[in-house]
């Protein structure tokens, strides 16, 4: 073996030894002194990634200074579509007293990935999650790493969405107390090395109640209720619809199912709350699901609510979450928010 080759082999062996030591020692994951709040169960190997590439968000720790760009994030809001989250980001700017100069537009930070949209409105990060557990799960992995790298202080996550209500007038807002899967388990199933694991879908009850306390049916003109949410892996059959391409049950069986889940306290059905609740619970991050109902499933399955009414409905979870943010940021009660001598919030970046 030539001298050069010998040196190469030695270098490569040293690198492998280093890697093994890293893995064995857990590469001293999170330094709790760096955070007032610690993310639970965080992957220790993140520390070995230099840079860490958040592929779907088109961000990496080499080219972006996470603490500088995202360190002030206090709230992370997720919703189904990029368009909705763009509107939400622009809405929230006004709601929390930020100003955007006329010439400035919010940019989609993750546009290059063509998967998710990501906007930053001061301390509020707004992202679209697509449809279903797998889609929101990928986004959450990357957002949790984002808030970790950025050293954000105890951020709160919200999912603002649409859902099918059970016995509720369309337009009702449901704050989820517990997310159930299609087998009615308060769990999200994750298959690791062929073995299913059930992750609990625990949501922060204090946060849910706090949000509920900020609703005012008389003033709002619609109800906001607390209830369980059934999170399905499908819009049609798993939600017992009669209008999908396939249907293997009768209308009577459908009504029976709706009655059964309603008796269990299920108020609405959607497609992401189990993944959302379970993943954030794993991380020890406070989270809430706020969805407006766009159909009363006792009356039908098709979404025939006119588009302009749906647009109005979209705003309802946003309005509630904005009230919460104002309360937290300005530390004043909602009813005195207008005249509250709040500290000005820094310019939006
Ligand atoms: C609500 O609406 C979408 C399906 O139309 C899905 O993302 C959900 O949870
Ligand atoms: N989203 C769902 O998943 N189901 C509905 O019925 C409405 C919206």
Image (tube, rainbow, N blue to C red):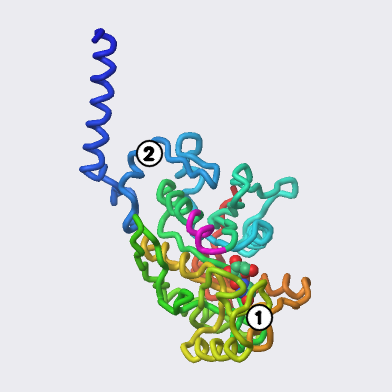
Label 1 SS: loop
- Between circles 1 and 2, the one closer to the viewer is 1
Find the distance from the CA under tag 1 to the CA under tag 2: 48 Å
Residue 155: within the magenta? no
Residue 40 location in percent, x, y?
32, 58
Which residue position is annotated with label 1?
Answer: 242
Q: Quadrant of ligand 1?
A: bottom right
Q: Residues within 10 Å of mark 2 (few under 14, many from 20)?
A: few
- Seen in the picture, residue 238 relative to 138 is either above or below; the reply is below
Which residue occupies the foreground of this view, 73 or 334? 73
Using the rendered view, name the quadrant where residue 252 is placed.
bottom right
At a point 55% along the width and 42% down the height, the residue shown is: 58
Principal SS element in the magenta part?
helix
- Seen in the picture, residue 188 relative to 31 is either above or below; the reply is below
Which residue position is annotated with label 2?
Answer: 49
At a point 48% along the width and 44% down the height, the residue shown is: 54
Using the rendered view, name the quadrant where residue 319 is placed.
bottom right
At a point 24% along the width and 10% down the height, the residue shown is: 1
Please say whether residue 318 is visible from this viewpoint: no
Residue range corresponding to the magenta coloring? 132-138
Residue 116 location in percent, x, y?
59, 52
At a point 38% along the width and 66% down the height, the residue shown is: 281
- Seen in the picture, residue 337 relative to 76 is either above or below; the reply is below
Which residue occupies the foreground of this view, 12 or 257? 257
């Amino acid at each position: 073996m030539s001298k050069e080759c010998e040196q190469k082999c030695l270098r490569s062996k040293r690198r492998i030894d280093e890697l093994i030591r890293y893995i064995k020692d857990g590469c001293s994951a999170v330094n709790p002194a760096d955070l007032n709040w610690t993310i639970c169960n965080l992957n220790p190997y993140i520390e070995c990634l230099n840079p860490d590439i958040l592929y779907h968000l088109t961000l990496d720790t080499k080219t972006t200074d996470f603490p500088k760009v995202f360190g002030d994030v206090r709230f992370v809001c997720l919703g189904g579509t990029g368009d909705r989250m763009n509107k939400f980001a622009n809405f929230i700017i006004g709601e929390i007293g930020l100003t955007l100069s006329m010439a400035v537009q919010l940019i989609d930070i993750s546009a290059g990935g063509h998967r998710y949209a990501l906007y930053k409105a001061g301390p509020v990060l707004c992202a679209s999650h697509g449809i279903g557990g797998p889609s929101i799960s990928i986004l959450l992995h990357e957002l949790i790493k984002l808030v970790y790298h950025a050293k954000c202080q105890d951020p709160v996550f919200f999912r603002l969405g649409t859902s099918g209500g059970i016995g509720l007038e369309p337009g009702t807002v449901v704050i989820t107390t517990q997310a159930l899967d299609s087998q009615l388990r308060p769990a999200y199933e994750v298959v690791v090395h062929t073995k299913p694991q059930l992750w609990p879908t625990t949501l922060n009850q204090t946060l849910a109640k706090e949000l509920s306390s900020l609703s005012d049916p008389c003033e709002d003109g619609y109800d906001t209720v607390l209830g369980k949410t059934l999170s399905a892996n499908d819009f049609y059959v798993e939600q017992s619809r009669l209008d999908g391409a396939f249907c293997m049950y009768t209308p009577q069986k459908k009504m029976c199912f709706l009655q059964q889940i309603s008796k269990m306290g299920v108020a609405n059905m959607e497609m992401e709350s189990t993944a959302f609740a379970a993943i954030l619970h794993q991380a020890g991050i406070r989270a809430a699901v706020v969805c407006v109902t766009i159909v009363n499933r006792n009356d039908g399955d098709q979404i025939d609510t006119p588009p302009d009414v749906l647009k109005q409905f979209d705003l309802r979870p946003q309005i509630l979450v904005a009230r919460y943010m104002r309360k937290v940021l300005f530390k004043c009660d909602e009813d005195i928010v207008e005249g509250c001598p709040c500290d000005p919030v820094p310019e939006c970046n």
